[in-house]
Image (tube, helix red, strand yellow):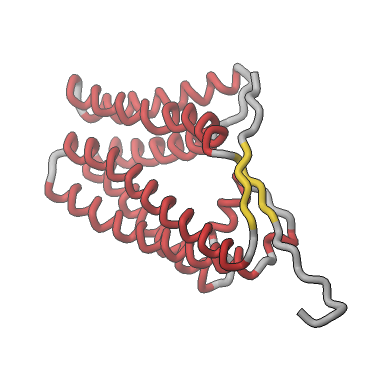
Amino acid sequence: APQGDEPMRPSQLTLPGWRSALRHAAPNVVEGKLLPTVLFVVLLQLVGSTTAVLGALVFALGAMVRRHRQGKEMSGLLALTTLALFTKTIAALVTGSLFVYFLQPTIATLLVGFALLGSVLAGRPLVERLALDFCPLEEQARKHPTLRAFFRHSTLWWSLTSMINFSITLWLLLNHSPTTFVLVKSVLGPLTTAATAAVAYLWFRVLMARSGTSVVFADLPRTS
């Protein structure tokens, strides 16, 4: 480096460790996604589709009421699940079609893919907004060119996987029974999300290493 110029020190980004993230996410996933799905499958087998869609919705609404009465912060996943269940249940009851109940979120997956792609073209990648919900970043960090590149790349990757997910889900919906669809989709969804997140994480580490930015993961203290 030219004399008189102070060499740039690599920056450091501290994020919650996997134990802290798991402790935080596990109850929300169980309550907001796993239990409504299990309840729907059980009721579908025992009493039929109408009771199944209503039962899943009532459970989600009950979970929201319970959180409110206990003074707990509302889970974003639970809120999204409840909203999705409400709109799907109304569509299914009005049309009398279980196919419509499942088709609505399938189309939503495709629209999410297009929205992600459009956000990159508009210069406002959606992954950046989602990341800020879980990992607040200072304005200076958000302007880092490598981090901005990561947000663009990961948004494009998420868009691609959303469109692939849509194609597979539509095929399942058109060619298999509702029970098979629910069971396969309940596994396919998390697997797709996990694979997408894993690739994004690896790419994040590659980009940060190339730019000389050190990333530190620190477990947060347990809250009682």
Q: Nearer the viewer, residue 224 or 73?
A: 224
User: Quick check: can you spot residue 77?
Assistant: yes
Residue 45's place in the image compared with 218, above or below, is above
Answer with the quarter of the image where residue 189 lies: top left
Q: Quadrant of the N terminus?
A: bottom right
User: Quick check: can you spot residue 97?
Assistant: no
Residue at image position (39%, 41%) is: 87
Q: Nearer the viewer, residue 203 or 34?
A: 203
Residue at image position (32%, 42%) is: 91
Residue at image position (74%, 62%) is: 140
Q: Position of residue 195 (x, y in %)?
A: 36, 51
Q: Nearer the viewer, residue 77 or 152?
A: 152
Horizontally, residue 182 falls left or right of residue 30, namely left
Horizontally, residue 211 falls left or right of residue 3, namely left
Q: Position of residue 156 (x, y in %)?
A: 44, 66
Q: Nearer the viewer, residue 216 or 124?
A: 216
